[in-house]
Amino acid sequence: MSYNDKHNEANGENSQDGEKDNRSWNMGVEGSADDPQICALRARQKRNFLATLMLSQGVPMLVAGDELGRTQRGNNNAYNQDNEISWVDWEHTDEDLLEFTKRLIDMRRRHRVFRRRRWFQGRPIHGSDVKDVGWFRPDGSPMDDEDWRVGFAKSLGVFLNGEQLDSTNPRGDPVVDDSFYILFNAHHDRVDFTTPGEDWGKGWIKVLDTFDPGAGEDSFGVRAQVPVQGLSLVVLRRAH
């Protein structure tokens, strides 16, 4: 979040080591920053990355210290740095980020829909008209093949059906969970998403917002407008 380029000078190899293709963005200032807007955006991006990781299927791989706001000061290959560059800085823990990470882990632990045991089918299962997963445009309509080929598409909704986990418990009973609608906005400006038709849910409650992690649990109905601020994501839980 703080560097566009690698800074491996301390490794003694004229910064020739380490990956050159770094998918990073410093938000306008290389290294540490005092600008409140840049600091707020960096904090939001940290929450975005952690939320995307923890709400994805499969085993989340979290690098030790990411939940604390740890930095390597731009060094992307700290193999020979047994010092402050590679150590975990417990003294300067980002307490807000740590609490947000705990919240994400708790959400993942409580809801099996975020840790399925089988692949998505992407189609109606067991005679149901609702799929186990659905992909939507911001206007609430399902995405088609053409939508996936649009290069400038930066925002989409993902429906995770907790009633279609296709899994059983040790007693052989079907495992069911709440259903969720995750709204991703990678655009710089706010996007007003529309909740999908009632076949997907008749009511929704906002349970997570990376733009404002302290926001209350707002409620939304069918085909309702849900504002998602720029460079943020919102998680809705199906109420009924």
Image (spheres, rainbow, N blue to C red):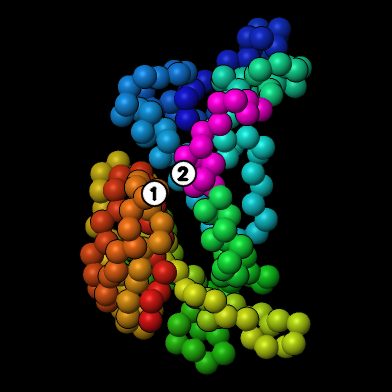
Give the residue type that dot 2 points to: Arg
Q: Is residue 146 in view from this perspective?
A: no
Q: Is residue 31 in view from this perspective?
A: yes
**Residue wearing tag 1:** 213
What secondary structure is the stretch in magenta mostly built from?
helix
Tell me if residue 99 comes above or below residue 112 in the rendering: above
- Residue 99 % position (x, y): 51, 45
Numbered range of the magenta stretch: 88-101
For label 2, the SS is helix
**Does residue 234 appear to the left or right of 93 in the view shown?**
left
The residue at 42%/36% (across/down) is 43
The residue at 67%/72% (across/down) is 118
- Residue 112 % position (x, y): 60, 70
203 or 23, which is in the foreground? 203
**Residue wearing tag 2:** 47
**Does residue 28 appear to the left or right of 17 in the view shown?**
left
Circle nearer the viewer, 2 or 1: 1
Q: Is 90 contained in the magenta span? A: yes
- Residue 178 % position (x, y): 49, 75
Q: In this view, which residue lies farthest toward the bottom?
A: 127
Q: Are marks 2 and 1 in contact (CB under 8 Å)?
A: yes
